[in-house]
Image (spheres, rainbow, N blue to C red):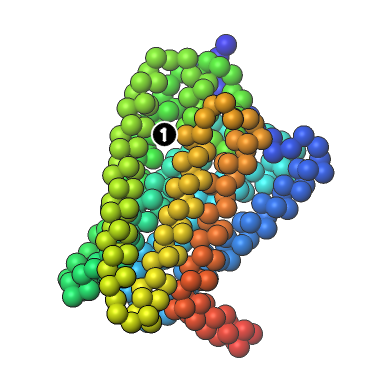
Amino acid sequence: MSNSSSISHFLLLPLADTRLLQLLHFCLFLAISLAALLGNGLVIAAVACGHHLHSPMFFFLLNLALTDLGSILTTVPKAMHNSLWDTRTISYAGCATQLFMLVFFITSEFYLLTIMCYDRYVSICKPLHYGTLLGSRACVYMAAAAWASGFLYALLHTANTFSLPLCQGNALGQFFCEVPQILKLSCSHSKLRELGIVVAGVTLAFGCFVFIVFSYVQIFRAVLRIPSEQGRHKAFSTCLPHLAVVALFLSTGTFAYLKPPSISSPSLDLALSVLYSVVPPALNPLIYSLRNQEVRDAVWTLMIGWFQKQ
């Protein structure tokens, strides 16, 4: 038996048992991380350099790309290192940092997706008030609130989780550090504190979810009243990418944490963790690029300009 003061490192879940599969996982994670870096990097550069994209929708898209980059860089490099060097260890401080950063970026992303929904609602349902409700100062304040809320929630989660005495060993059932796996190592009755933090977070998340659903009901009602087919297509082209990203984000994360215990298994848990923590950051830029002509044109212009300079 040990406590948290005597734990110097944790053992992460290995991605595979054989050396060949470990190298295969390394190559797969390398490809996904490069796709995420390239896609989100192009979106960030296109929005930053394209003056015609300096609007609230693309400002929030830039912030979303930053959260995607942060979340995938939090988990994937360590998993790649462990697969390449056939190791499982992560230091105590490294685990705490990884948990904090992951909660920070995921929470901030969900709040940003909620704000982006509000942007689409105002743009389509209240277009005459768009400039007033979503001025540059208001956008900066909303983005700052999303990042600050994610930071505070992650700080609270991390401090509370690692303040619990750990007496169930140091082996985690996940390839990265996450709150449920740390709590499994605790034998303290203070888990109720963590439960209170989780309930508060779920309540806020549910409120955001209800707001998103209500907003999209109003958005689709307004879009269907647009007389021209071209106008409806343009409205849908700005809403569907956001709706697809929200659906991917919520469906993978919700199923990973709320699936019935009867169907739980190490391989399924591992696959679901990859789906909600690794795949969305790589797919989000592709979703926005495929459905939004302005993003495609800006990325294409950026790439042509770069090649011409070479």
Where is residue 239? Give x, y as percent: 38, 66
Q: Residue at x 57, y 52 (%)?
A: 279
Q: Is residue 60 above or below residue 45?
A: above
| Residue occupying image coordinates x 54% and y 51% | 72
Horizontally, is 13 left or right of 146 in the view?
right
Query: Looking at the image, can residue 67 be seen?
Result: no
- Label 1, on which residue? 158
The residue shown at (51%, 77%) is 296
| Residue 23: image location, x then y, percent | 77, 47
In this view, the residue in front, 173 or 69, is 173
Query: Of residues 152 and 274, which is closer to you in this image?
Result: 274
Q: State the image coordinates of residue 45 (x, y, percent, origin top left).
A: 48, 72
Q: Picture quarter containing residue 207?
A: top left
- Where 215 sits versus 165, above or below? below
With respect to residue 226, does 101 lie above or below?
Answer: above
User: Around disc 1, counting alpha carbons within 10 Å, would you say few (fewer than 14), some (14 to 19), or many (20 or more)?
Assistant: many
Where 20 falls versus 6 (above or below)? Answer: below
Q: Amino acid at mark 1?
A: Thr
Q: Position of residue 1 (x, y in %)?
A: 57, 11
| Residue 174 in view, yes or no | yes
